[in-house]
Amino acid sequence: MAAQEENNLENQERKYTPETKLPIPTEAEIRERLTTDPKIQAYFSQFTTSSVEEFIKSYCFYKGLWWEHGDMYTRHTQNEEMQWIVDAKTHLEIIQQKKLFDVQCLWRAEKLVLPGVEICYDILRWERKIFSCPFIEPISQEDVDMYIQYLSGLNIEIDFGFLYTWQDYEGIKEAYNEESEDNTFPDWYEFHNSRTGNQMLLSLPDIRGEKEDPYRKAYWEHWHEVNKEVQEANLATIDQRPFISVFDTEKMEEFISQFEDKQTQGFYKEFTYHHNYREAGEEYNKIIEMLLKSEKVIPIEAHYDFRDALKLAAEKFKVQKIIEFLPFAYEEYKFQREMGFEDEDQFGDEYHVNLRKTIVDQILEGRKQFGEPEDLNF
């Protein structure tokens, strides 16, 4: 942690945010200072007269450039640092996702009662507003320290994106009990369980889910029965043949090889090759640009493919940057909580209100099919 604090301090000292933009010094002003300041003259005395004159001439030119473009590059650097804080904040969300998943396990097993939670979807709703979830503990410094320990031992990609649905109860439990290509148990969940012993929650029964599912199944069975004739009529009007698309590489090559002349085939291959090459080049240029900006040496491990080696080095670099900026993201998180800022959901509250109503209607209709009261007391 000492090394990390030192890095953060260096990062803060590197920042420059001028409160007022001063006028760009003229060449005459720069030259006058260089040729009249006693301390500067004493420094120049150790060098040859001709080299000092050339130095002054060049220095006037470059200092003008620094002042003319310095603010732009400073803002660019600060924007990049802000992006690292945004990325680090995503990982604070992941900390809270594990807490919510553990709560979901307990609620589904009817081990606790949660205010405002009547159906399984009421918990899933908070996956995209995790910082505002009312029934999990706020992030603590201990949580951040544990997550940094997790990242420090990580040797895989950390750009989860939308590949993870953190509250997918059935999928995550299946992945825990039986590893498969379709379902992968989140590494953070595994690490957290190893430190907390919360893997026991995965063995709890899904009482709420088992109560709710038959009602929704009954609803759909009834719906299909009522709409059977309409569905069959609609099915008869649907073209059952497969789609063809210019974005399907296999189909494109098949079509061109059968119906185009040799010259068109050759042009297609050359165009595709150079287009793919350019896209790959842009990807690796971004990786190299990111690595070049590091103030530290970044080792690249031996690999049979240099491209994979570069990607691996970039991923490790990202991990180190996330570790570096997590404390800043945590401070911002605490400030936003103190100010009472609400976590925004990209889908909007209206979307979830309507979706919840649809699910509730399905459950109530299912209960009706079973001859039970049309309420959520089950």
Image (tube, rainbow, N blue to C red):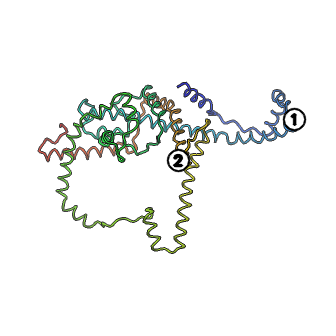
Q: Does 200 appear above or below 169?
A: above
Quarter of the C terminus within the rendering: top left
Q: How many marks?
A: 2
Q: Nearer the viewer, residue 165 or 297?
A: 297
Most distant residue in the right direction = 49
Which mark sits nearer the N-terminus, 2 or 1? 1
Q: Does 232 appear above or below 75?
A: below
Rendered image quadrant of residue 10: top right
In percent of width and height, residue 230 lies at 21, 62
The residue sitting at 61% across, 37% down in the picture is: 297
- Residue bearing mark 2: 308
Most distant residue in the left direction = 371
Q: Nearer the viewer, residue 249 or 11?
A: 249
Rendered image quadrant of residue 2: top right
Identify residue type, mark 2.
Asp
In percent of width and height, residue 156 lies at 47, 40
Identify residue type, mark 1.
Thr
In this rendering, position of residue 329 left or right of residue 50:
left
Disc 2 vs disc 1: Cβ atoms closer than 8 Å?
Answer: no
Rendered image quadrant of residue 178: top left
Q: How many neighbours does mark 1 have within 10 angstroms: few (below 14), some (14-19), or many (20 or more)?
A: few
Q: Does 9 appear above or below 239?
A: above
Q: Nearer the viewer, residue 259 or 358?
A: 259
Q: Nearer the viewer, mark 2 or mark 1?
A: 2
In this rendering, position of residue 274 left or right of residue 43:
left
Under circle 2, the secondary element is helix
- Residue bearing mark 1: 48
How far apart in space, not on screen, are marks 2 and 1 (Cα)? Answer: 51 Å
Under circle 1, the secondary element is loop
